[in-house]
Amino acid sequence: MPSTEAEVPDAGRFPAHVGAPGGRPVRRAKDATWPHARLSVVLGVIAVVLSTSLVGASSALAARPSATTLKRPHAAAVRPLKRRKHHHPTPTTTTTTIPPVTVPPLATGQRIGPGATGAEVVAIQTRLIQLGYWIGTPDGYYGDATVQAVYAIQKVADLPRDGIVGASTLAAIDRGALPTPRTTTGYAIEVNLATDVLFMVDNGRVEHVFNCSTGGGYTYVESGVSNVALTPKGIYHTYRAVDGLVTDSLGQLWRPRFFVDGYAIHGDSYVPPEPVSHGCVRVSNEAINWIWASNSDPVGTEVWVYS
């Protein structure tokens, strides 16, 4: 017996409540698009539910402050900060922070020299150290270090170089006679052949001054070749240092610091107030020991030699 659901001729011509010919109720044929319509409805409902949920969640998140918001006070509660004015102190110099030592005036014709001791020697040493003339520690004894410093200031002040403090030398000490550097920026060592002094300069400021002895200008013979004892002029750099005694055909160099070829700043036991070397720059053994200890002439230091 054929199924009434299998084939319904012209079923689309009759309303669902009207019977087909023969009095039998007509069952509407299943529409092939129904599953798709049903699925669309379901998906639509799901979309509405999800949309409602998302809107609710968004509202909740909007109402809840974020972690960043929690760390910040409400804009209305923030008080404007008043910027403090920073007062930078005016840089001071040694002359303003440390009053210069006044050396007591000498009696008429009085001279203070090697071997002297006492308060007057301490005052002379302290004042020279304040100016930058290297002595070491003021100990009240007028020894070789003090003599070397007095040589240096006498050279700078264009005074007789006898290493003794008389009226004219004391006046130079009191007024603070210093060499005039040529370098204005950075750190450098300058050797002025005209005055025969070595001094260290930092950004145009003289820090330490030493008596030195440079090339004497005499002729000497080395390995059968005649040479003139001159210190070469120019701008050089310390390139090598030997921590000890170096002996060559011309003599001995104590702890030399070479700045060009075989020319060096080195210590010597004999550093008179005039040029006598073969061309090196001699300073006292005490002075070169201090230069090593204080690392005042590291490799790479600019060295200016001029007259």
Image: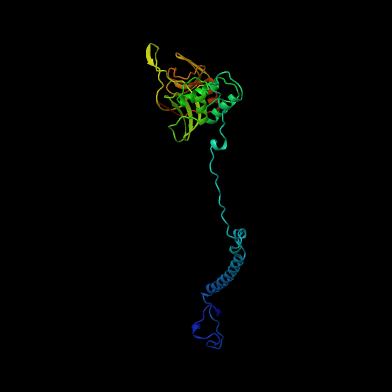
Residue 151 seen in the figure: yes
Residue 255 seen in the figure: no
Residue 31 higher or lower than 270, as above or below: below
Q: Quadrant of residue 81?
A: bottom right
Give the camera-side residue of 18 and 152: 152
Residue 229 position within the rendered picture, expressed as x and y whole percent measured from the top left: 40, 17
Q: How is the image coloured?
A: rainbow
Residue 209 position within the rendered picture, expressed as x and y whole percent measured from the top left: 50, 27
Of the 4 image quadrants, the one containing the N terminus is bottom right
Q: Quadrant of residue 40?
A: bottom right
> Residue pushed farthest left?
226
Residue 146 position within the rendered picture, expressed as x and y whole percent measured from the top left: 55, 22
Residue 32 higher or lower than 21, as above or below: above
Give the camera-side residue of 116 and 24: 116
Count of numbered marks: 0
Residue 235 higher or lower than 162, as above or below: below
Residue 182 higher or lower than 231, as above or below: below
Residue that appears at 45% across and 14% down:
250
Residue 270 position within the rendered picture, expressed as x and y whole percent measured from the top left: 50, 16
> Residue pushed farthest top?
224
> Residue pushed farthest front?
108
Of the 4 image quadrants, the one containing the C terminus is top left
Give the camera-side residue of 277 and 103: 103
